[in-house]
Image (cartoon, coloured by chain):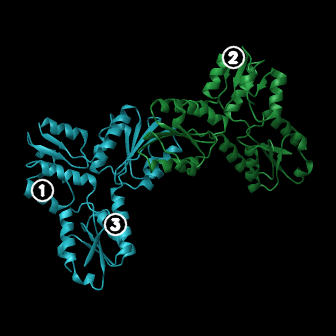
Chain colours: A green, B cyan
Amino acid sequence: MKVKLASNYGFCFGVKRAIKIAQDYKDSATMGPLIHNQDEINRLKKDFNVGLYQDLKEVKDNDTIIIRTHGIPKNDLQKLKDHNAKVINATCPFVTTPQQIVKKMSEESYSILIFGDKNHPEVKGVASYAKNSSDVHIILDIEELKNINFKKNKIATVAQTTKKKEKYLEIINYLILRNKEIRVFNTICDATFENQDAARELSKEVDVMVVIGGKNSSNTKQLHAICLENCQDSYLIENESEIKKEWFKNKTLCGITAGASTPDWIIQKVVNEIELI
Amino acid sequence: MKVKLASNYGFCFGVKRAIKIAQDYKDSATMGPLIHNQDEINRLKKDFNVGLYQDLKEVKDNDTIIIRTHGIPKNDLQKLKDHNAKVINATCPFVTTPQQIVKKMSEESYSILIFGDKNHPEVKGVASYAKNSSDVHIILDIEELKNINFKKNKIATVAQTTKKKEKYLEIINYLILRNKEIRVFNTICDATFENQDAARELSKEVDVMVVIGGKNSSNTKQLHAICLENCQDSYLIENESEIKKEWFKNKTLCGITAGASTPDWIIQKVVNEIELI
């Protein structure tokens, strides 16, 4: 079976970088899971002895701790340092940027608006960089925005990297019409949308499509839905063991894409298997 | 005839203030017409000996010169000072704000985008406050924006005070999607829209409507068009001499509004005349 990979798929720049960093620091531990893929976490443990802490309390003196792409709240970073942990920062540069913006804008007496999910680790980390937590407001939609009473007359905005730009613009427009100064930082990362755009294009030109990723992963499910729009024969699998030969009967070209947490080695096994059909 | 005035009509805050300033400085001259209403300019000349210069070359040493609401380019202000003119600044505070924003943002190395008409005196004045004129771009729509190659990676935006907010947002949204930082200053003044909103409301509750203003004034014509939407019997007049008695036959309530350049004393004469019908 002939196979064609999407022009963008799988890990984003930040995750690729974090995994490379983890491999470079054997016998370390990540603070929270580095990626939403148990196979990859197992591989890092087996091949590089990279462990996993779920809680700061687990950290022991002189541990080597890897900060994952989402970043970490400022106080937690301090606690790690208090443990004399060797801290290896694999925070995605696209997340470091809003952290630094929040720090600077807060020092310049702006109220801070974060468009994102207040329970998401990335957002918790970004918010923690404000001088005063009371200057930071985290919202998911305009309804929540309406309830905010900004203390400062100038407002700076950042967005969680994976949020939709259209929704961010709606929020910004609402603010501009009601305030004298809005300082807008476009901190949204294109990676998720690049995978989606590439899947959309590829699914138009193939007659069967395989999407590789976690069945519970929302970004993988979205890729699958996008492929189904253009190619009825689109299948979602977690790994090569789920491939079924009958999918490829009378087909000439199989498109392949993968969710943002699917490592290349799993993708490669799927490609090899389908090429043998 | 019973008469009801719109809740907002006629001069905005800035024009009222400028005329008061002119009356306080007898024997002065304005740099350019203070207002687009010849009757009012004649009154200022007759009652307060406030003259009118059309060109800087007319200024004589030690003249008292009134800067009108639109403001004046920075270099022209300097030329007035070189003449030892006594400069009385009646620039509208809502225009001084974007002037100062352009100055500050330009000093902080922002590229400046002005949404406005590059031939309008207000915009010329605002633009003149940039450190380098090459950092300033003046546009009226997104098509013009597409041709701009911004030299700086951060952009500050201001708008001519009388522009429409919806169009300003369109321009800002275009910029946000393509740049890392946009610093948005909402410098649009509500005065024009407040007159329009008030005219819209009043024209719904009366059975005849009189709009007072210049027949060539675009804001007066727009007020008239808005009134006609709700009240077929809406008439545009320049002063009380144009009132026709038949307009009020079988009518019970006459609404009155006036364009942004219509002085109160003209409005009052119209009100008096209609009340006598």
Residue closest to the eye, A236 or B25: B25
Q: Earlier in the sequence, mark 3 or mark 1?
A: 1
Residue B44 badge: 1
Residue position for label 3: B222
Residue position for label 2: A85
* Rendered residue at 59%/49% (across/down): A141
Residue closest to the eye, B187 or A241: B187
Judged from the image, the secondary structure of the residue bearing numbered disc 2 is loop
Work out how far the residue at label 2 is from the one at label 1, CA to CA, in angstroms. 78 Å
Work out how far the residue at label 2 is from the one at label 3, CA to CA, in angstroms. 69 Å
Judged from the image, the secondary structure of the residue bearing numbered disc 1 is helix
Residue closest to the eye, B154 or B189: B189
Q: Amino acid at mark 3?
A: Gln
**Subunit of mark 2?**
A
Q: Quadrant of the N terminus of chain B?
A: bottom left
Q: Quadrant of the C terminus of chain B?
A: bottom left
